[in-house]
Amino acid sequence: QVQLVELGGGLVQAGGSLRLSCAASGIIFSSALLNWYRQAPGKQRELVAGITSGGNTYYADSVKGRFTISRDNAKNMVYLQMNSLKPEDTGVYYCNVPGGYWGKGTLVTVSA
């Protein structure tokens, strides 16, 4: 079955950086569209970034220029490099494969 496991969350001060990782199994990884979503306290889950099988990327306006999504098909990993973090980036970050596949999430807390 499909498994997605996120790593790399934590507490960071505003202006700092974190790198999230997602290990995927049970899918043909090289063909998969991969997304990162986040859910802030009291808010709906929102799309943060995505990367196609061909390496094309897309981002939410709120993170453009600060976040970078990448993939390593040899390792079945997708990453989210987050720089210049803001308190409003706080939330649980989820790895997603379209079709209803989600990881359990990793908490990112950005202090002011």
Image: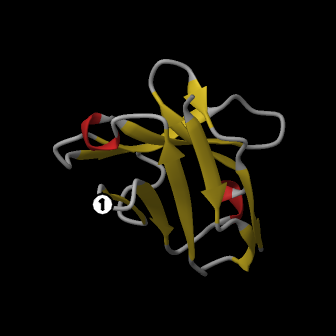
**Residue with the mark numbered 1:** 74
Q: How is the image coloured?
A: secondary structure
Residue 59 in sight from this viewpoint: yes
Q: Is 21 placed above or below 91 here?
A: below
What residue do we see at 72% from left, 57% from top?
90
Residue 91 in sight from this viewpoint: no
Q: Position of residue 41 (x, y in %)?
A: 82, 42
What residue do we see at 41% from left, 46% from top?
61
Residue 95 located left or right of residue 108: left
Q: Position of residue 84 (x, y in %)?
A: 52, 75
Identify the amino acid type marked 1. Ala
What residue do we see at 25% from left, 36% from top?
31
Viewer-proximal residue, 75 or 90?
Answer: 75
User: How many numbered marks have been drawn onto this rendered protein structure?
Assistant: 1
Q: Is 111 placed above or below 41 here?
A: below
Residue 69 located left or right of residue 16: left
Asked which quadrant contains residue 52, the reply is top left
Q: Residue furthest top?
A: 99
Q: Quadrant of the N terminus?
A: top right
Q: Residue furthest right?
A: 42
What residue do we see at 63% from left, 54% from top?
6
Viewer-proximal residue, 64 or 109?
Answer: 109
